[in-house]
Amino acid sequence: MPYPLELLYTKEHEWIRVDEGIGTVGITDYAQKELGDIVFVELPKTSDHVTANEPFGTVESVKAVSEIYSPVTGDVIAVNTKLQNNPELLNTDPHGEAWLVRVRLSDPRETEKLMTAEDYEAFIREVKQR
């Protein structure tokens, strides 16, 4: 199973790992493969507020610019500054070192609407069949 079981997933291909009310957010392996070689990432600032299902940044690849959607509502408490000089980390380690932001969740129950790894894999299979 290529998608880590401890993560939750969105239909926009973001993931979140929640630990004691803090969510670490990134894009999925599927998303980075679809984008191709990533050349630039635009992220919010620490203390910015993000809203579930709303864009909070962009990922630019040689193919396109794609918006990144927040899986939860809350305040950004950390931004992965490594991605400023090394956006290609998203291509090599999307579920690990290439996390995007950490968010203090306003309402932890929002995560109940997200997909498990198994659900996300089924969703990806559906997308590929279209």
Image (cartoon, rainbow, N blue to C red):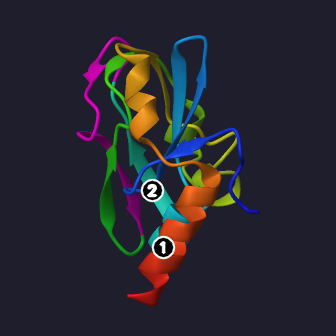
Q: Is residue 59 above or below residue 52?
A: below
- Label 2 sits on residue: 13
Q: Is residue 48 above or below residue 59?
A: above
Whether residue 52 is visible: yes
Q: As drawn, is 53 to the left or to the right of 39?
A: left
User: x, y percentage for residue 32?
Assistant: 53, 63
**Residue 34 - label:** 1
Are the residues tagged 2 and 1 within 8 Å (C-beta)?
yes
Distance (Cα) linking label 2 and label 1: 10 Å
Residue 57 is one of the magenta-drawn residues:
yes
Q: Nearer the viewer, residue 33 or 53?
A: 53
Q: Nearer the viewer, mark 2 or mark 1?
A: 2
User: x, y percentage for residue 97?
Assistant: 69, 39
Q: Is residue 14 above or below residue 21?
A: below
**Residue type highlighted by circle 2:** His
Q: As drawn, is 54 to the left or to the right of 60?
A: left
- State the residue at coordinates (32%, 44%): 69
Give the residues drawn in magenta, as a range: 45-61
Q: As drawn, is 60 to the left or to the right of 53?
A: right
